[in-house]
Amino acid sequence: MLVNKIIKKRTKKFKRHHSDRYKRLKQNWRKPKGIDSCVRRKFKGKTLMPNIGFGSNKQTRNLTPRGLYKIKVRNHRELEIIQLSNKKFEIEIDRRVGRLKKKKILENACSFDLKVTNPPGKK
């Protein structure tokens, strides 16, 4: 089904410079703007900055390893929308859905021949 092999150029998150040094700095990426910043000036061995070259291939972007797109489902009515395109999408049941509704969604997904990435456990 996959035309191209999925290649991730970078799987690690880009961390903010000095976020490991100071507790007050969160790890969320922020572009360094200082005039002497070694990260902004791209010194060898320093934190990498995100740029366009780290982007994924357009054909394989947002695909799961199975080669399908993932859609989050909150109720069984949302399944009916993607029932015809079961070869293109797989579903993930939202974490806020209760046990009984998860069971109902799973039964409907099986009848529509849809893949479920997080089926409910046995309880």
Image (tube, rainbow, N blue to C red):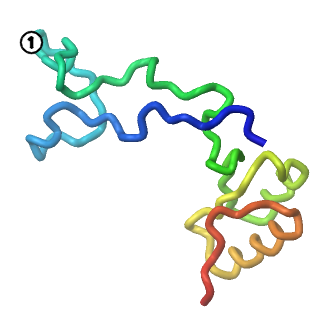
Which sits in the foreground, 53 or 105?
53
Residue shown at 11% from the left, 46% from the top: 23
Q: Residue at x 21, y 21 (%)?
A: 32
The quarter of the picture where the C terminus appears is: bottom right
**Residue 18: quarter of image:** top left
Q: In this view, does 10 lie to the left or right of 36?
A: right
Residue at image coords 87%, 55%: 83
Residue 97 picture quarter: bottom right
7 is higher (above) or lower (below) than 67: above
Classify residue 49 as left or right of residue 41.
Answer: right
Q: What element carries label 1?
A: loop
Q: Residue at x 80, y 60 (%)?
A: 114
Q: Is residue 12 above or below residue 32?
A: below
Judge the density around disc 1: few (<14), some (14-19), many (≥20) Cα neighbours within 10 Å.
Answer: few
Q: Position of residue 26 (x, y in %)?
A: 22, 42
Q: Taking 106 as reference, is 114 above or below it?
A: above
| Image quadrant where residue 116 sits | bottom right
| Amino acid under disc 1 | Asp
Compare residues 99 and 13 and report the one nearer the observer: 13
Q: Where is residue 113 in the image (x, y as percent from the top left)?
A: 85, 63
- Give the camera-side residue of 25 and 85: 85
Front in this rendered view, residue 24 or 40:
40
| Residue under numbered circle 1 | 36
For the N terminus, the image quarter is top right
Residue 53 position within the rendered picture, expressed as x and y whole percent measured from the top left: 45, 19
Q: Disc count in the image?
A: 1
119 to the left or right of 19:
right
